[in-house]
Amino acid sequence: MFLRVVARCKMQGAGYISHHAPRLAHYLLLASCLLPFLASLACASGTTPTFTPVAPTARLVPSPTSEPDDPGWQALGNGVELRRLRVTDANGTSNRLWLARLDPARVRFRVLYDQANPRLVSEWFGAAKALLVVNAGYFTEDHHATGLVISDGVRSGKSYTGFGGMFAVRTDRVEVRWLVAKPYNSAEPLRHAVQAFPMLVHSGGKPGVTEDDGNLARRTVVGQDRRGRIVFLVSPDSFFTLKNLSAFLVASDLELDTALNLDGGTSSGLMLAGPDGPTGVDSWVKVPAVIVAEAR
């Protein structure tokens, strides 16, 4: 420190010296006290002493606000539960999922579709004043649904045949079903529905996807567990392939009977009414169709 002060004095002149005169005097006094001691050491050993600086020891202190990998299900009221589950792949990459589980006996589901006025999931949530809003099925560049959509009994699009699945709402029940095992029938008294693909979990909790293209993407899933509850899952990062997601769902503790892959990528979004206000992950683009959950 003394040498640095002297060097600065040489470079910056009298103004710097006068400003730092008290500090310089202090260093000079300290040096005068140490020099005899250092000299005695040198004489005793016959060598000039050397000093090796010791680096401070770093200590990592865990954040008191860090969230555990699996805090479990948190009851939000009105039959809605939230879970924020961290998953890690073989390379150590982690991703925290958004999961919501809803009791159809306490929640009413609707599908909203507005091809002329698409919105971010957060905008749909703000307008609907609902318990939960999640993005729904696939759509074209001009926001036309590629599969069947039913909103308040009004049908749009065309049903998939021989593939895909459907989230279907009747006055007496809600179901997530595989269209191969149970095709859509236009005579069904459906009030709301949306179709997408592929089925990730077939009836009975069997894997729905065994091969894929290996692409990682943000994902949105709607499933139904063995107790009839509806489960939504959103992966906010490009973490899962479809095959890996299917395997994860089957092996998880969600006890899913069926699960359907909804539109993912930039469309993925889920917003819900949390204890401190709206919470969730927003879509990156505007979507024309969403699934809404409201209190009965």
Image (cartoon, rainbow, N blue to C red):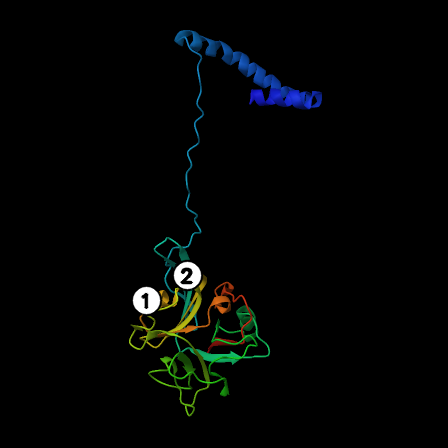
Q: Which residue is mark 2?
A: 239
The crowd level at tag 2 (other Cα within 10 Å; few <14, some 14-19, many 20+) is many
Residue 220's image quarter?
bottom left
Type of amino acid under label 2: Phe
Note whether 144 is above or below 81 in the view shown: below
Q: Quadrant of residue 141?
A: bottom right
Q: Amino acid at mark 1?
A: Ala
Q: Taking 181 as reference, is 281 left or right?
A: right
Res 296 visible: no
Q: Residue at x 57, y 18 (%)?
A: 27
Estimate the x, y position of residue 226 in percent, counting from the top left: 31, 75
Which label's residue is closer to the chain start, 1 or 2? 2
- Residue 94 visible in the displayed image: yes
The quadrant of the image that shows the N terminus is top right
Q: Residue furthest front?
A: 213
Residue situated in front as seen by the camera: 64 or 175: 175
Secondary element type, mark 1: helix
| Residue labelled with disc 1 | 247
Find residue 185 and report its horizontal and vertical position in percent.
Answer: 40, 89
Give the Cα separation between the discs numbered 1 and 2.
13 Å
